[in-house]
Image (cartoon, rainbow, N blue to C red):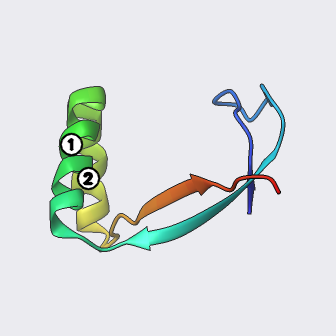
Amino acid sequence: MTIAPCKVDGTLLGDWIPATAREVKDHAIDQKVDTLLEQKYGEMKKRFAQEAALQGRKYTILEVKVRKSS
């Protein structure tokens, strides 16, 4: 895949770079991500999580790594 830094509206702020991603399935990391999101978004995170749970949706955690150019 390729990724690029951007604003919240998708306006590019830099160049596209190659990267890889994988789904992370680890309870300790789930807890850490949940804590970080709670610290950053507070009540808004709680409301979105509650709504997602009521709708049967689950979060997916992705680990993204920039690939080194050859």
Proximity of marks 1 and 2: CB atoms separated by less than 8 Å: yes
Give the vertical position of 59 relative to 13 (above or below). below
Q: Judge from the rendering whether residue 32 lies leftward or rightward of residue 56; answer left or right.
A: left
Dot 2 crowding, Cα within 10 Å, few <14, some 14–19, many 20+: some
Mark 1 Cα shell of 10 Å, populated few (<14), some (14-19), many (≥20)? some
Residue drawn at x 24%, y 66% as measured from the top left: 54
Q: CA distance from mark 1 to mark 2?
A: 5 Å
Residue that extends furthest to the front in the rendered view of this protein: 70
What SS does tag 2 mark? helix
Which element is circle 1 on?
helix
Name the residue nearer the viewer: 6 or 45. Answer: 6
Q: In the depicted view, which residue is nearer to us: 12 or 47?
A: 12
**Which residue lies under the disc numbered 1?**
46
Q: Residue at x 31, y 61 (%)?
A: 52
Q: Quadrant of the N terminus?
A: bottom right
Task: Tell me which corner region of the image, top left, top right, bottom left or bottom right, holds residue 39.
Answer: top left
Residue plotted at (21% across, 42% down): 46
Which amino acid does the dot numbered 2 rest on? Ala
Q: Is residue 25 left or right of residue 70?
A: left
Amino acid at pointer 1:
Lys
Vertical position of residue 65 compared to residue 54: above or below? above
